[in-house]
Image (cartoon, grey):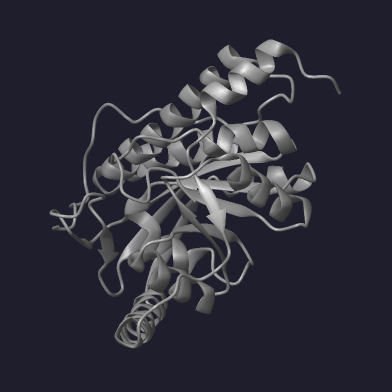
Amino acid sequence: MTRTASAVSAEAHAEPNIFYDGTPRPLTRWQRFLVWLTAGAGYASIALIGRTLRWEVVGQENWDAIRRAGKRVIYTFWHQGIFSATWYWRRRGIVVMTSLNFDGEYIARIIQRHGYGAARGSSSRGGLRALAEMKQHLEDGRDVAFTIDGPRGPRFLAKPGPVLLARRTGDAIFCFHIAPERAYQFKKSWDLFQIPYLFSRVAIFQAPAIYVPPNADEAAQEAKHREMQATLDRLRELGETWWKLSETERAQVRAEFSAGVLSAVPSRSSGGARGRA
C-alpha cells in the first residue's frame, strides 16, 4: 500500500525514541555476581509472595474478546505494578522491553525465569528498529508488553509506542492495572514501586481493547494516544479506590467491565480499609 506524505510525516513526528537489541550488555565479573545474586533474590521474592496472593479479576471478558478476534495482545501498564504483573502473567512467553542499563540486566533475568522474553532497549537511540523488533514478535505469535512510563518516567505519562505498534500490526492495545489491598510502596522511587504484602488481596482491572486503524493519520494517532492515557489513568484511579468501595459499588463496576464498558470511578466510597503504604 502506498503511504501518503502526511502519513510519513505523522509517523516521524510520533516515533518513540527507543531502540531494541537482544544482545546482553558486557558485564564485569563483579557485575555478573551482582546480577546473579539480585536476579535470584528477585525471582524468589516474586514466587514466594505471588503464591500467597488472592486475586480478583475485573474485566476478564475484555482479554477474552481479543483472543476471540484472533489478535495478539500489546500489554500496557504502569511501571509501578511490575512486581505483581510479573507473577500474574507468568509463563505465557510475553516479550517485555527492559533497558540496556545495569538495572535492566537483572530485571531481564528475573522475568525470563518467570517465562517471559526480554527485548533490551534504550531511550537514547532511534525507534524504527524498536518497532520492527516488537512487530516481528507479534507476527511470530508472541504477545508483547510495555511498562508504558518506563524505564525512568515521567511517572504515569504514557509513551506512544503501543499506538504505533497497533497501527502497524492491527493487534490490540490492552491496558490493565493491578491494585493490592495491602502493599509496601517505595515512596522515594520514581515509579512509586509496589510490593504486595503476603496473603494480600489483589485486584486486576482489564480494560476493553484499543484498536488503531492501519490508515490512521497523525490526528487519529494522537487521539488513540489520549485514549490510552485516559484508560490507564481511569484504571489507576479505580485501583486507588477499589478497597474502599462497598460490595454494591464493586458489583456495579464488575458488571460494566463485563459489558465491555470502562467503568467510571464511583463518586462515593464506603467500607473497607486501605492497606498502609
Residue 8 image point, x, y percent: 67, 20
Q: Which of 65/94 is in front?
A: 94
- Is residue 65 rendered to the left or right of residue 158? right
Q: Quadrant of the N terminus?
A: top right
Q: Residue at x 61, y 40 (%)?
A: 128
Q: In the image, is residue 263 above or below residue 187? A: above
Q: Which of 30/14 is in front?
A: 30
- Is residue 242 rendered to the left or right of residue 213? left
Q: Which of 84/64 is in front?
A: 84
Q: In the image, is residue 153 above or below residue 48? A: above
Residue 245 image point, x, y percent: 28, 42
Q: Residue at x 31, y 43 (%)?
A: 153
Q: In the image, is residue 189 above or below residue 156? A: below
Residue 164 image point, x, y percent: 61, 32
Count of marks placed on residues? 0
Residue 265 visible, this angle? yes
Q: Residue at x 50, y 33 (%)?
A: 160
Residue 206 image point, x, y percent: 51, 45
Q: Quadrant of the C terminus?
A: bottom left
Residue 263 visible, this angle? no
Which picture quadrant has residue 103?
bottom left
Which picture quadrant has residue 173?
top right
